[in-house]
């Protein structure tokens, strides 16, 4: 199987979600099913069907997380020597050469990506254009609105 890169924070978040699903949500759902069964006729018992749907979702999510964690390759960028090169996990300050605006992105795994928090997936067009480049390099990102030129201002190991 292919190893899936993930930051240390991303792995911690997934493990916490898995722990919550197993130790908090699963027992709560089992209790809700037991209470709904006690009400009698299961065919027309909306509470029972809702609890079973919750159980199905939770068990599916547990399997999904366990699968991801079994293939994860945790990369702690803080332990990697700083070279000024953009690699997985680094935080990059970019200057848009067309507008002179500065933006900061952190390159993370697919499951950790959150554009609102400027965390972009390693598979995104911007990240693919940046990986392997060094501070001071100019990169062209192929965006739906057209090509955008960025200069890599700084690379941080945060």
Image: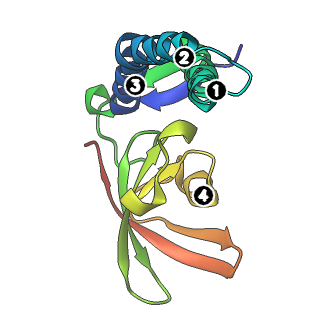
Quadrant of the drawing holding the N terminus: top right
Mark nearer the viewer, 3 or 1: 1
- The disc, 2 or 3, on the residue closer to the chain's N-terminal end is 3
Residue 109, image x and y in percent? 52, 38
Q: In this rendering, would 57 be left or right of 138? A: right
**Is residue 26 visible from the viewing direction of this image?**
yes
Q: In this rendering, would 31 be left or right of 139? A: left
SS assignment at label 2: loop
**Is residue 86 visible from the viewing direction of this image?**
no
From this view, report whether residue 101 is shown above or below residue 118.
below
Mark nearer the viewer, 2 or 3: 2
Q: Residues within 10 Å of mark 4 (few under 14, many from 20)?
A: some
- The disc, 1 or 2, on the residue closer to the chain's N-terminal end is 2
SS assignment at label 4: helix
Q: Which residue is mark 4?
A: 129
- The disc, 3 or 1, on the residue closer to the chain's N-terminal end is 3
Q: Which mark is residue 75?
A: none
Q: CA distance from mark 3 to mark 1?
A: 30 Å
Instruction: State the residue at coordinates (63%, 46%).
Output: 123
Disc 4 and disc 2 in contact, CB within 8 angstroms = no
SS assignment at label 3: helix
Q: CA distance from mark 4 to mark 2?
A: 59 Å
Q: Looking at this view, is 66 or 152 the one in front?
A: 66
Q: CA distance from mark 4 to mark 1?
A: 54 Å
Q: Residues within 10 Å of mark 3 (few under 14, many from 20)?
A: some
From this view, report whether residue 33 is shown above or below residue 94.
above
Q: Which residue is mark 1?
A: 45
Q: Which residue is mark 3?
A: 17
Q: Residues within 10 Å of mark 2 (few under 14, many from 20)?
A: few
Q: In this rendering, would 37 be left or right of 145? A: left
Q: CA distance from mark 1 to mark 2?
A: 8 Å
């Amino acid at each position: 199987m292919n190893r899936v890169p993930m930051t240390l924070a991303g792995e911690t978040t997934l493990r916490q979600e898995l722990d919550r699903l197993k130790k908090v949500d699963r027992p709560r759902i089992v209790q809700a099913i037991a209470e709904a069964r006690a009400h009698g006729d299961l065919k027309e018992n909306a509470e029972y069907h809702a609890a079973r749907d919750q159980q199905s979702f939770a068990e599916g999510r547990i399997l999904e997380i366990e699968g991801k964690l079994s293939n994860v390759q945790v990369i702690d960028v803080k332990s990697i020597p700083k070279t000024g090169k953009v690699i997985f996990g680094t935080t990059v300050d970019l200057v848009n050469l067309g507008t002179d605006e500065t933006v900061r992105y952190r390159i993370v795994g697919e499951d950790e990506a959150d554009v609102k928090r400027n965390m972009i997936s390693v598979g995104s067009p911007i990240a693919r254009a940046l990986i392997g480049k060094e501070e001071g390099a100019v990169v062209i990102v192929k965006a739906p609105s057209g090509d955008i030129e960025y200069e890599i201002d700084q690379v941080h190991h945060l």
